[in-house]
Amino acid sequence: MVSPVKSLSLREDVDGSICLHRKVKTGVYKSVSDFGFTIVYMVKFEGLLNNLSGYVFEVNKSLGEEQITK
């Protein structure tokens, strides 16, 4: 998955959790969050409401060994 912000991506961290990373240089990424997300739905409106289109995310966060999903 690619973020709208250039060089941000979801990657697996060293502890196995999926979180946001920023590209530091070619092949090197640094974790910038303690959470990740998955796209649940894409909401797309037509006509005059098309500027309200977007995504519904499920946020995944690890707290120690426990997985917290909101």
Image (cartoon, helix red, strand yellow):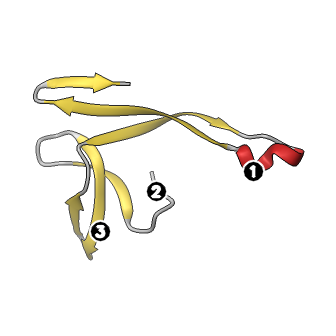
Given this view, does label 1 or label 2 mark the residue nearer the observer? Answer: 1
Find residue 36 and name its label.
Answer: none
Picture residue at 37% right of the left edge, 56% below the top: 9
Q: What is the crowding at mark 3: few (fewer than 14 residues within 10 Å), some, or many (at least 20)?
A: some
Marks 3 and 2 sit apart, C-alpha to C-alpha, by: 12 Å
Marks 1 and 2 sit apart, C-alpha to C-alpha, by: 21 Å
Sequence-first disc among 1 and 3: 3
Picture residue at 23% right of the left edge, 43% below the top: 34
Nearest the viewer among 12 and 3 is 3
The answer to whether the residue labelled 1 contacts the one labelled 2, judged by CB atoms less than 8 Å apart, is: no
Picture residue at 30% right of the left edge, 63% below the top: 22
Sequence-first disc among 3 and 2: 2
Give the amino acid at mark 1. Asn
Sequence-first disc among 1 and 2: 2
Marks 1 and 3 sit apart, C-alpha to C-alpha, by: 29 Å
- Give the image location of residue 63, x and y in percent: 16, 29
- Give the image location of residue 38, x and y in percent: 43, 37
Q: Is residue 55 left or right of residue 5?
A: right
Indicate the quadrant where residue 16 lies.
top left
Q: What is the crowding at mark 2: few (fewer than 14 residues within 10 Å), some, or many (at least 20)?
A: few
Q: Assign a secondary structure to mark 2.
A: loop
Give the amino acid at mark 2. Val
Residue ID for mark 1? 51
Q: Assign a secondary structure to mark 1.
A: helix
- Give the image location of residue 37, x and y in percent: 39, 39
Find residue 23 and name its label.
Answer: 3
Q: What is the crowding at mark 1: few (fewer than 14 residues within 10 Å), some, or many (at least 20)?
A: few
Residue ID for mark 2? 2
- Give the image location of residue 66, x and y in percent: 16, 22
- Would you place residue 70 above or below residue 53 in this image? above
